[in-house]
Image: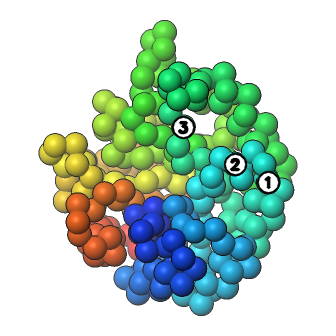
Amino acid sequence: MKIGAQMFTTRATCQTLEGFADTLKRIADIGYTTVQVSGTCPYEGEWLRDQLKLNGLKCVLTHIPVPRLTGELDKVIEDHNTFDCKYVGLGFWAFDEARNMTWDQWMETFPPIAHKLKEGGKYFMYHNHDREFIKVGGTTYLEKLAEAVPADEMGFTLDTFWIQAGGGDPGQWIEKFSGRVPCIHLKDYAYGREMAVVGEGNINFDRVFEKAEAAGTQYMLVEQDDCHGEDPIECLKRSYLYLKSCGFN
């Protein structure tokens, strides 16, 4: 399994192409060789391809805004072909009636997108938060999603922090979704429901690594949405050093 950096961690410095390019360099300087592109300013596929090559990086997963998935999917596929990325992700969906993000709306919108991505040689990846662990009739939304979309058309970027925040066991859910988790997010959970540098919180990562390996995970992407005032690059570096000490690179 390879480790990488989820660039939502560094989104604040990626709101211009100049800042985005500099951030890619700083991530590569830490030692990461793979990234997930998420939360950045708009970019052209050719621009990202060239910047990745310049820094010896590979983009293995993206999170694409919903309007692009629903309105310009052909261009999304073309761009991912340009910078050689198979996994196309949906970063957030609330399943919240008050926000008009219902189950029925999701089912009307995303299974056809997943199918078209498969036809284009890509694989749709759903990223969970804690709300997916709400149970409806005794079944979590996460389980309902797995049942509703075929495994060959949708995988899950399971997030260790949000699984724990939802009351789940990260290792158990990775095992449960074996074969559908080519990418996962490594995010530690500290006292007070705080996100932490990987290895500085309380998640049992030895078990996560064991279950991920058995489940066929290819990429473990470090993410820290909130760095509590610290430099996100410094947080990514400490996570990298911890993971490297565990034998990953």
Mark 3 or mark 2: which is in front?
A: 2
Q: Give whichever of 174, 231 is nearer the camera.
A: 231
Q: Report the side of 194 relative to 101 (left or right).
A: left
Q: Is residue 179 above or below residue 59?
A: above
Decide: marks 3, 1 in contact (CB < 8 A)?
Answer: no
Q: Residue furthest left?
A: 191
Q: CA distance from mark 1 to mark 2?
A: 8 Å
- For label 1, the crowd category at 10 Å Cα-Cα, with few meaning under 14, some 14 to 19 and many 20 or more, is few
- Specify the amino acid type for callout 2: Pro
Could you tell me which secondary element the residue under label 1 belongs to?
loop
Residue at (81%, 61%) from the top-left corner?
A: 75
- For label 3, the crowd category at 10 Å Cα-Cα, with few meaning under 14, some 14 to 19 and many 20 or more, is some
Q: CA distance from mark 3 to mark 1?
A: 19 Å
Residue 81 drawn at (x, y percent): 77, 68
Could you tell me which secondary element the residue under label 2 belongs to?
helix
Decide: marks 1, 2 in contact (CB < 8 A)?
Answer: yes
Looking at the rendering, in which quadrant would you find the C terminus? bottom left
Residue at (46%, 30%) from the top-left corner?
A: 132
- Specify the amino acid type for callout 1: Glu
Residue 46 drawn at (x, y percent): 74, 79
Residue at (39%, 59%) from the top-left corner?
A: 223
Q: Which residue is mark 1?
A: 72
Could you tell me which secondary element the residue under label 3 belongs to?
loop
Residue 6 shows in the view = no
Q: Is residue 33 above or below residue 106?
A: below
Residue 22 shows in the view = yes
Q: Report the side of 231 relative to 222 (left or right).
A: left
Choose top left, top right, bottom left or bottom right for residue 87: bottom right
Q: Which residue is mark 3?
A: 93
Specify which label sits upstream in the sequence, 1 or 2.
Answer: 2
Q: Which residue is mark 2?
A: 67
